[in-house]
Image: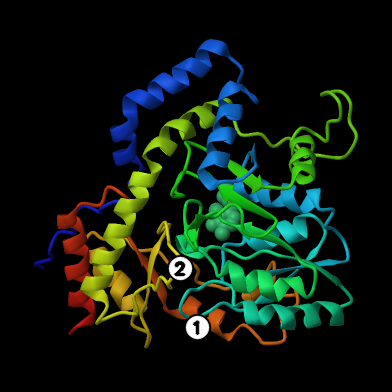
Amino acid sequence: MNQRPIPPMIPFIDVAAQRHRLGGAIDAAIARVLGHCQFILGPEVRALEAELAAFCGAKHVVTCASGTDALVLALRAKGIGPGDAVICPSFTFCATAEVAALVGATPVFVDVDAVTFNINAKGIAGAVIAAKRAGLTPKAVIPVDLFGLSADHAAIAEASKAHGLFILDDAAQGFGATFNNRRLGTFGHATATSFFPAKPLGCYGDGGAVITDDDTMADMMRSLRMHGQGSDRYDNVRIGLASRLDTIQAAILTEKLKIFPDEVVTRDRIARRYSEALGDVVVAPAVPAGMSSVWAQYTIRVAGGRRDKLAAALKAEGIPTAIYYPIPLHRQQAYRHYPVGEDGVAVSDQLAAEVISLPMHAYLDEPTQDRIVAAVRRALVS
Ligand SMILES: Cc1ncc(COP(=O)(O)O)c(C=O)c1O
């Protein structure tokens, strides 16, 4: 047999390349924390919160242990719980809906737009009807800035206003993206993000934050992340959780934030190169006017059942791919009993069958991009 050897796999997300760029600065930042030993809510946490607030143009940033906890803290701070409906897209990572269930509320699924993959604001009214029919009180909507692209926050605000919905933006993938030239963080009533290592702004473990201009919510979330503390740690005025961002992670994030805007520009350049080179053979991701993406993923659509063939062909050439998300939430075992909005979720089903993500990170050099493009074209144009 004369089998061609498989070339070494290129990384899907190259955390090590960034680590190399930042190496000395991160080591020094960690050493400073090791020096003062304030591992929980140390000075680096407060400094990072101020830096992140300035970055987004927001009043408050409350850091916490994960993006999932960030969503939970925001819902808990608004008192959302049993009997309440939380409207969210079906085509997203499970945490978006999971947090509704975790606080005792009920997720109600809405479809996404076929071009942007983000929540279709026109579906919100139909989700409100479905929620009421199920005996629930519609209280909140969680739009997602999927794959790093800002959702249409103007349309979401408009559609939510009539129903008095609390808008909690899930920017776990989209932190740093813009809508009408403003960075995410001040759209809706609160914005949650994740610092999971693979995210555009990731730390070296788990981490998350809530961004808000609402003073009362910020105070409430600071209490909730510390077991519901009141005037001091041993004054417990409500049931809370233990959810802080480690001081070491805050120190790491401060260093990473310094190069983040530059990384976002590079990601955008790579995405444009991909789209120019592939736009005639796949459905390349769209970035509508007035929005930007931080490209948490570069996700194309491949119709006609050719996706598996493409993934296999790329793998054989040492190029990893990923499918985000193969099963929309309304079909997942843990979520399929929850209500779906009046307009259905057909686009979510279609996207789950067609999407595939290519390697994307700020350290993907042009020869590697060209290798990926050539392999995709070879697989599809034959
Ligand atoms: C859209 C979305 N929401 C929420 C989360 C949850 O973030 P974390 O993994 O930090 O809990 C993630 C990330 O994993 C995500 O992609």
Image quarter in which the N terminus is found: bottom left
Image quarter in which the C terminus is found: bottom left
Q: Does mark 2 have its CB less than 8 Å from ligand 1? A: no
Image position, residue 265 (x, y; %): 33, 52
Q: Nearer the viewer, residue 23 or 271?
A: 271
Q: Residues within 10 Å of mark 2 (few under 14, many from 20)?
A: few
In the displayed structure image, the side of residue 94 where residue 55 appears, left or right: left
Mark 2 or 1, closer to the camera: 2
Identify the mark nearer the N-term, 2 or 1.
2
Instruction: Point out which mark residue 350 bears.
Output: 1
Name the amino acid type tagged 2.
Gly
Image position, residue 304 (x, y; %): 37, 88
| Mark 1 residue element | helix
Whether residue 171 is visible here, answered yes or no, is: yes
Residue 247 vertical position relative to residue 35 in the rendered view, above or below: below
Name the amino acid type tagged 1.
Gln
Residue bearing mark 2: 290
Q: Nearer the viewer, residue 332 or 381?
A: 381
Q: Residue at x 44, y 38 (%)?
A: 257
In the displayed structure image, the side of residue 358 where residue 81 appears, left or right: right
